[in-house]
Amino acid sequence: MEKMRFETVKEAAYAAREMFEFHEATKNREAFFAFTHESLIEESQLQSDLSDFMHANHDVLDEDYLYEYVVDALDHIIEEDNVNEDMLYDLAYEDVSVYTSDLTEWLAKNSSHIYWADEAIKEFSPDDISKILSLAQGSARATIYNGTYNVLEQFVNKDDE
């Protein structure tokens, strides 16, 4: 596989975003994002590296949320100017669910999400469950947003290469 090269992270994000599609909910399945059939057939290095990154994080985040957060990160990189890891960190916490019911649903979706709640308690010492869950989801999002950025950054032409 030849490694694709881009001038900017935003350009790489555009290419990566085209590799994902949204599937509407059915009576047996919630709505979800997935790689397009075409991107799986083409097997580009970008798709492969994104897939490897997602697989590496599968043990600490539900697959549906993992795909959603990668797509959210790509959308932010495309929509915002001069995105960097610090900005993505802030955007991740801005994207946290505001309703406690959504946060408890997030926690209940996969037992691995307890990891994020435990980390939030250790790092921030929040004083109520809503704050714990908000910080947990924010931390999960920030990890995926920044990891997605790092994958894209590997495909950007560098002056010293």
Image: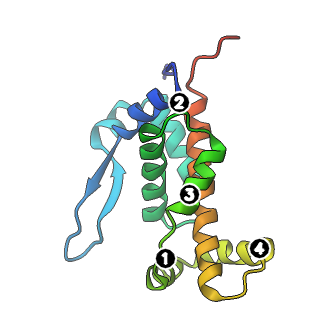
The vertical placement of 133 against 156, above or below, is below
Q: Secondary structure at mark 4?
A: helix
- Which one is in front in this view, the residue at disc 1 or the one at disc 4? 4
Q: Earlier in the sequence, mark 3 or mark 2?
A: 2
- The residue that disc 1 covers is 106
Q: Position of residue 51 (x, y in %)?
A: 50, 45
Q: Mark 4 and 3 residues: CB-CB less than 8 Å, in contact?
A: no
Q: Earlier in the sequence, mark 4 or mark 3?
A: 3
Which is more toward the observer, 99 or 152?
99
In 3D space, how far apart are the residues under numbered discs 1 and 4 (Cα atoms)?
A: 19 Å
- Which one is in front in this view, the residue at disc 2 or the one at disc 4? 4
Q: Mark 1 and 4 residues: CB-CB less than 8 Å, in contact?
A: no
Which is more toward the observer, 45 or 24?
24
Q: Position of residue 158 (x, y in %)?
A: 64, 16
In 3D space, how far apart are the residues under numbered discs 2 and 1 (Cα atoms)?
A: 30 Å
- The residue that disc 3 covers is 92
Task: Tell me the kind of residue under disc 2.
Answer: Val
Q: Mark 3 and 2 residues: CB-CB less than 8 Å, in contact?
A: no
- The residue that disc 2 covers is 9
- The residue that disc 4 covers is 124
Task: Tell me the kind of residue under disc 4.
Answer: Phe
